[in-house]
Amino acid sequence: MSLTDVTVPTDIALNTDLYELTMAQGFFEAGLMDNEACFNVFFRDNPFDGGYAVACGTGQIADLVENFVFTDDACDYLAGLRAPGGGSLFTPAFIDYLRGFRARLDISAVPEGMPVFPREPLVRVIGPLVDCQLVETALLNLVNFQTLVATKTARVIRSAQGHPVSDFGLRRAQGPDGGLAVARASYIAGAASTSNCLAGKIYNIPVFGTHAHSWVMAFPSELDAFRAFAKSSPKNCCLLVDTYDVRQGVENAIIVGHEMEAAGERLAAIRIDSGDLAKLSKMSRQMLDEAGLDYVKITASNDLDEYTIQSLYAQGAPVDSFGVGTKLATCDPQPSLGGVYKLSASRATSEEAWTPAMKLSEMAYKRTIPGIQRVVRFLDESGSPIGDQIVDDSYDTGSAKAVDVTDPMVTYDFSGHKSIELLQPVVEDGHAVGEPEPIEVARKRCHDSLMVMDPAYLRFLNPQAYPVGLEPGLAAVRERLARHERVQR
């Protein structure tokens, strides 16, 4: 399923910041709308103080671009906007231009599920200046949040040590669209299921859920509630045992479990949603085993994240699966990825050579990388990534060495290692390249990619910094531009 299955297609072009449109009008008025530009999407720091991020949302870019049009209704709305100083905000000529607009873009992106690192482009957008500018906000909105969620989920999945994790975050997510994005991205990153039925329908993600505390409280007793649920859902019976007292809840679950056995059914699991999960899960496991219900699983929930799950297993907690909600859906403790969209090259016509562009900034931290960039990932003999090299073909010296993206005193040498290209075409002249990739393909890519990563980059505490550098020719261009800009200033 595509982005337009959950977003009204005619609204996509207005899902933008106003300044994209005021800049577009300025370019139009200046006669620059057909000048060509190259923009890159990247982030400056790994989220969650980790060693990597997981690319996500890029699989929906083609759908976004193909449906990025300004309908008559949208144009009429824009035509009615007033400028703060009086008069119309947009000119009739520009509104007419938007009525016939189609994004004539070539876009390459990192496939969903691939590990990515600071400063290297996740997405490269090439095309007319106005077209590139107009899609900025919508594209960042698509990639930023899903990459953040996928990264958070990958960390949770790693802490769960192969045990299933379900996305329970819909009720705490940032709105309906946020809930759908969480379900999609978390599934790509390894979640086994979601509680979100709409996401299940749209993206064909397995859905999971049983009952809440209100079910238990609606009956005269907990045992009555458990019996009623077992009768109603004998093939999907997971009993929530902490409404009143966990020990008593497990005792009642055992009674119902034996009654289900007598009826030819089986109690699937119990869920603990409060209290000392390590202590209570150990107690519950012992009680279930002694009652002959060793097949009954234990699932845990209650504000879980990668650190609490890691701690549970460090304490020997016999938990078989997890429902992770708030801290997954809100990406606690980091609310945004901070991905940006920066101009890296321009030219007046397609016959001219590209002119690299660089934002110098008052802060060295915010200096950008110029040129028409591509990313080469080098692999060792086992297929494990050992470093990435950012290359501009116009300045490529053919070297397998690289200058660190933030510290020019640090260099890497990837000579003798095989390599792959990270950025893959997804849009050509505004149209999708090939058929949409099934979500299961992205999910498998994420699993396989993280399985071969050196654990030093994946650990939660003080992960090793993954090498990302500029090919020497591009490093020289960047240094030359920086010197020139400093002289000009």
Image (spheres, rainbow, N blue to C red):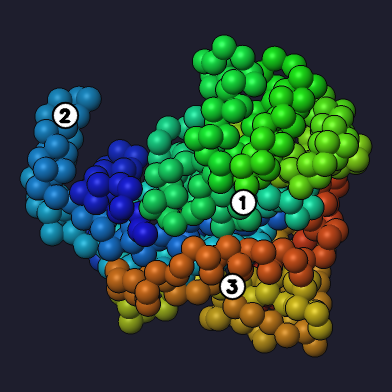
For this rendering, which residue is in front, 101 or 297? 297
For residue 82, which numbered disc appears in the image? 2
- Residues under numbered marks 3 and 2 in contact, where contact means CB atoms less than 8 Å apart: no
- Residues under numbered marks 1 and 2 in contact, where contact means CB atoms less than 8 Å apart: no
Q: Is residue 417 above or below residue 96?
A: below
* Residue density around tag 3, few if under 14, some if 14–19, many if 20 or more, within 10 Å: many
- Between marks 3 and 2, how big is the CA–CA gap? 44 Å
Q: Secondary structure at mark 1?
A: loop
Give the residue at mark 1.
191
Q: Residue at x 46, y 67 (%)?
A: 438
- Between marks 1 and 2, how big is the CA–CA gap? 47 Å
Q: Is residue 285 above or below residue 47?
A: above
Give the residue at mark 3.
422
Q: Residue at x 64, y 18 (%)?
A: 222
Q: Which quadrant: the N terminus? A: bottom left
Q: Earlier in the sequence, mark 1 or mark 2?
A: 2
For this rendering, which residue is in front, 59 or 254? 254
Q: Position of residue 403 (x, y in %)?
A: 75, 68
